């Protein structure tokens, strides 16, 4: 299920429950039941795989009184869910499930926890349990609402096969659609997945090669930042269990969500450290609260990441000696931005790295914030500043930055990146594309000055600017104003300076400028007569460029095809894309006129689709291509939308692709029938237009007079049998409808036969056919997009030429001449009328200077 399908499901369920649940509480029910489903599935997986217990035995053995099995499960999973309380049992019981059983299940879960990891699981369902009574005025209404929620949760994918953070996405969707006001007032700024990935990639690059890693988010929210860092680090290492996750969150419901999300990522409980506390008021203890004397250990970590609430009020009084702030000073009471930053920096190891999202104001605001900023710069802690596009965070449209800081740095400068113009529109918000993220990460890692994008700024320059870090001071992203050559505008002709602006093209398409521009006597130029586009496309240097780029594309695509099809391995992960993207930049980085990040975006989009299939293929591997699954569609039944099966579909490749490759004759037969039906439809429309005017109001024509109504038509054929003007037309239409009926029966049979043939074909695919289908399904779309990009490069050049010609194509002199011609024509016409209207026409001629 993709994001849009999941969003539609949630919206549909919300509409049913809207009158029962407050909008800002709806997420707590959905997310709580999602987590309970995950825990239930985890237990069933343990029973099936490790304990080798058949599903038919669950009911008899999975009971609390079976102490041996109960304790074994509690040792392995740290919790135990009896058969009666399993999520799958709830689904099986359907409308027999009541609110009392759900409450009993949540109480049972808490009671049967293994004490070893109480800190991870204890109270995790408190928010859900407290809210059950709000689902209706009585137990019957509450039970019905629960049944609807459970039914929705059953359809949400929880197997980790999606290419997105399901829990995080659901959280963001619910916040943005149902709890906008509550979320904003409560300071719940969910970190968009793309921003989370950006921060994670920077951190992962810095930490690569380390054996054990600890990461911390002091304002953890849904936990997405921590999870994405873990995923990014996994690209450089295989042992994901060497990462320890520390999280602190103020709001209890959101703290529970952090725990849920980390557990659902199959992170070992021993690697999860979580706290429900106010980060600024109650710093992370340096000891285990259960054994403070024996466990004292200051908390310093390899990476700290955070997206704290922006410019929040806090209480600085009495914190002058707090070790987090004593070196740098206290943030103002009205803006806690630097308080969060200093908290994060304090917990960072000397060789660690931190990234924090903040509003732009921290770069230039004065007073106590200015003093803190000065101290951070003087002590060489600020490593980079990344300006993000506006309106990428839900709940606030203000532009934000990511600040990267380190405790110990060798370099004495600050990298300033302005990525504010790199985004795509996504509904009401802006969104970073994968190429935008990669561009920022590459700029950070290479640490070079790129005009208009990033600048390496010396500390002396920053001090000279009075410690002001405002991005426009260091990176000029302003667009050059359009310049017009006055002589060219007045007299016509393109100045050479304008042609020279296209120098990147002339250096590649050598000599082409002399072929398409001719110089006039005044030293100005014009495009040659004829089809300029054809001249460009036929020019040898242009063909050499496109052939060379095409060759690179083919070479890279062959590498991709071999990596993902020929060398396919069960469980292929992001490390494959890491290798493919490295090869992409190796192949395309030195090709002129193209932006390698455009190529990267095309391949990234295609890779996202490929990984959905790879994840779905799971342990079956490529064998899953040779299988089908029910094609489920929504249909209205008894005034309700229900999901029903409508035939079959390929588990991986679509029916249409199989038909194009291996069932061409059957497909051609069906296409022929469909073409004949379309021809009949067009002929009937033509005959409707040909009905004589005297018969336009007859019942045999439809309301808009573009077709016929069959029953009145059949009657009219008999009535107007003796009308030579009308009868042949009506008879022809009747015959066409008869032929259409026969063809539709043939079509129905052909569709069914083709579907059966496709299903049989898929289920009997050879290994060679499977590879051929995967090539068409995975690789060919990328080839087509890359070739289209190659064509676009040349077309963009032709558009530049066209724009240049239009800019200077009509001179003021020509316009002036045209005005004079029109004026003379008007004067001539007026003089012909002057005799009939002495005063008026004479005055007008005088005004035109014709007297």
Image: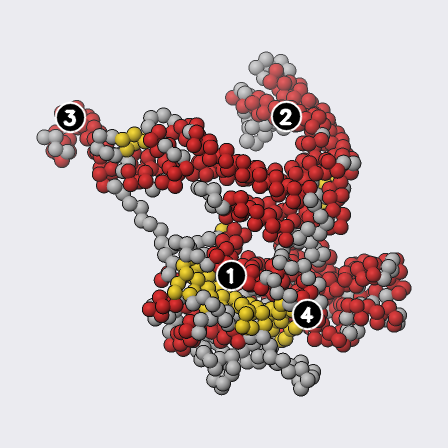
Mark sitting earlier along the chain (2/4): 4
Residue farthest along the left direction in this orientation: 851
The secondary element bearing badge 4 is classed as helix
In this rendering, the label closer to the viewer, 2 or 1: 1
Q: Quadrant of residue 250?
A: bottom right
Disc 2, disc 1: CB below 8 Å? Answer: no
At label 2, counting other C-alpha atoms closer than 10 Å, the crowd grade (few under 14, some 14-19, many 20 or more) is: few
Residue at the image position 50 percent from the left and 39 percent from the top: 789
The secondary element bearing badge 3 is classed as helix
Find disc 1 in the rendering and name its residue. Answer: 393
In this rendering, the label closer to the viewer, 4 or 1: 4
Q: Quadrant of residue 65?
A: bottom right
Disc 4, disc 3: CB below 8 Å? Answer: no
Q: What label sits on residue 271 in the rendered view?
A: 4
Find disc 2 in the rendering and name its residue. Answer: 675
Find disc 3 in the rendering and name its residue. Answer: 831
Mark sitting earlier along the chain (1/3): 1
Q: CA distance from mark 2 to mark 4?
A: 63 Å
Front-lying residue, 849 or 321: 321
The secondary element bearing badge 2 is classed as helix
Residue at the image position 90 percent from the left and 64 percent from the top: 60
Front-lying residue, 86 or 639: 86
At label 4, counting other C-alpha atoms closer than 10 Å, the crowd grade (few under 14, some 14-19, many 20 or more) is: some
Q: CA distance from mark 4 to mark 3?
A: 98 Å
Mark sitting earlier along the chain (4/1): 4
In this rendering, the label closer to the viewer, 2 or 4: 4
Percent across and percent down for residue 746 are 73, 26
Mark sitting earlier along the chain (2/1): 1
Q: CA distance from mark 3 to mark 2?
A: 64 Å
């Amino acid at each position: 299920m993709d994001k849009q399908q999941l969003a539609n499901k949630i919206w549909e369920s919300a509409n049913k429950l809207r009158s029962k649940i407050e909008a800002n509480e709806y997420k707590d029910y959905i997310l709580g039941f999602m987590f309970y489903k995950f825990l239930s599935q985890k237990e069933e997986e343990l029973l099936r795989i490790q304990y080798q217990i058949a599903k038919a035995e669950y009911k008899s053995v999975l009971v609390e009184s079976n102490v041996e099995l109960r304790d074994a499960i509690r040792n392995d999973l740290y919790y135990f869910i009896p058969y009666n309380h399993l999520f799958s049992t709830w689904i099986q019981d359907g409308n027999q499930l009541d609110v009392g059983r759900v409450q009993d299940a949540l109480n049972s879960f808490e009671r049967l926890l293994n004490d070893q990891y109480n800190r991870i699981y204890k109270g995790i369902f408190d928010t859900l349990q407290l809210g059950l009574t709000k689902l209706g005025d009585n137990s019957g209404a509450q039970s019905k609402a629960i049944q609807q929620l459970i039914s929705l949760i059953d359809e949400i994918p929880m197997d980790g096969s999606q290419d997105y953070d399901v829990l995080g996405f659901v959280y963001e969707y619910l916040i943005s659609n149902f709890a906008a006001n509550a979320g904003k007032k409560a300071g719940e700024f969910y970190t968009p997945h793309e921003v989370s990935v950006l921060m994670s990639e920077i951190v992962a690059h810095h930490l690569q090669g380390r054996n054990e890693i600890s990461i911390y988010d002091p304002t953890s929210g849904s936990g997405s930042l921590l999870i994405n860092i873990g995923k990014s680090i996994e690209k450089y290492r295989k042992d994901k269990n060497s990462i320890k996750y520390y999280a602190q969150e103020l709001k209890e419901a959101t703290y529970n969500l952090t725990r849920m999300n980390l557990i659902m990522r199959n992170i070992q409980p021993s690697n999860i450290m979580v706290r429900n506390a106010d980060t600024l008021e109650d710093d992370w203890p340096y000891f285990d609260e259960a054994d403070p004397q024996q466990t004292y250990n200051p908390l310093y970590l390899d990476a700290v990441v955070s997206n704290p609430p922006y410019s929040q009020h806090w209480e600085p009084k009495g914190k002058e000696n707090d070790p987090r702030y004593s070196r740098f000073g206290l943030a103002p009471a009205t803006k806690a931005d630097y308080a969060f930053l200093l908290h994060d920096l304090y917990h960072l190891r000397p060789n660690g790295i931190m990234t924090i999202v903040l509003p732009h104001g921290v770069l230039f605001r004065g007073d106590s914030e200015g003093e803190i900023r000065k101290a951070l710069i003087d002590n060489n802690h600020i490593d980079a500043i990344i300006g993000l596009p506006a309106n990428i965070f839900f709940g606030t449209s203000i532009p934000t930055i990511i600040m990267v800081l380190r405790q110990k740095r060798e370099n004495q400068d600050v990298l300033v990146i302005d990525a504010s113009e790199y985004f795509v529109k996504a509904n009401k918000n802006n969104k970073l594309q994968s190429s935008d993220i990669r561009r920022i990460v590459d700029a950070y890692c290479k640490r070079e000055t790129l005009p208009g994008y990033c600048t390496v700024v010396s500390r002396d320059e920053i001090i000279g600017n009075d410690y002001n870090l405002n991005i426009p001071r260091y990176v000029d992203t302003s667009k050059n104003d359009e310049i017009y050559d006055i002589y060219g505008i007045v007299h016509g002709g393109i100045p050479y300076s304008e042609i020279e602006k296209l120098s990147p093209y002339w250096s590649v398409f050598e000599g082409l400028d002399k072929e398409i521009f001719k110089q006039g006597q005044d030293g100005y130029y014009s495009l040659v007569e004829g089809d300029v586009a054809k001249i460009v496309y036929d020019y040898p240097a242009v063909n050499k460029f496109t052939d060379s780029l095409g060759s690179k594309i083919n070479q890279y695509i062959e590498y991709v095809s071999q990596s993902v099809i020929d060398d396919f391995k069960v469980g292929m992960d992001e490390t494959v894309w890491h290798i493919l993207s490295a090869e992409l930049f190796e192949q395309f980085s030195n090709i002129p006129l193209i932006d390698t990040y455009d190529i990267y975006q095309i391949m990234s989009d295609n890779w996202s689709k490929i990984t959905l299939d790879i994840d779905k293929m799971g342990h079956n591997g490529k064998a899953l291509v040779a299988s089908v699954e029910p094609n489920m569609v929504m249909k209205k039944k008894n005034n309700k939308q229900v999901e029903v099966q409508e035939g079959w579909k390929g588990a991986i490749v679509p029916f249409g692709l199989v038909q194009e490759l291996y069932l061409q004759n059957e497909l051609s037969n069906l296409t022929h029938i469909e073409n004949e039906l379309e021809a009949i439809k067009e002929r009937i429309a033509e005959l409707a237009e040909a009905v004589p005017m005297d018969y336009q109001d007859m019942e045999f024509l439809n309301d808009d007079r573009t077709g016929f109504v069959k029953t009145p038509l059949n009657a009219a054929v008999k009535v107007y049998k003796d009308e030579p003007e009308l009868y042949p037309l009506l008879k022809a239409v009747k015959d066409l409808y008869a032929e259409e009926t026969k063809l539709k029966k043939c079509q129905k049979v052909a569709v069914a036969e083709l579907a059966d043939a496709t299903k049989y074909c898929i289920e009997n695919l050879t290994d060679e056919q499977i590879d051929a289908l995967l090539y068409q399904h995975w690789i060919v779309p990328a080839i087509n997009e890359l070739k289209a990009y190659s064509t676009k490069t040349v077309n963009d050049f032709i558009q530049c030429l066209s724009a240049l010609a239009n800019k200077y194509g009509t001179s003021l002199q020509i316009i002036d001449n045209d005005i004079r011609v029109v004026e003379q024509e008007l004067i001539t016409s007026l003089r012909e009328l002057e005799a009939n209207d002495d005063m008026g026409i004479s005055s007008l001629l005088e005004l035109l200077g014709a007297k």
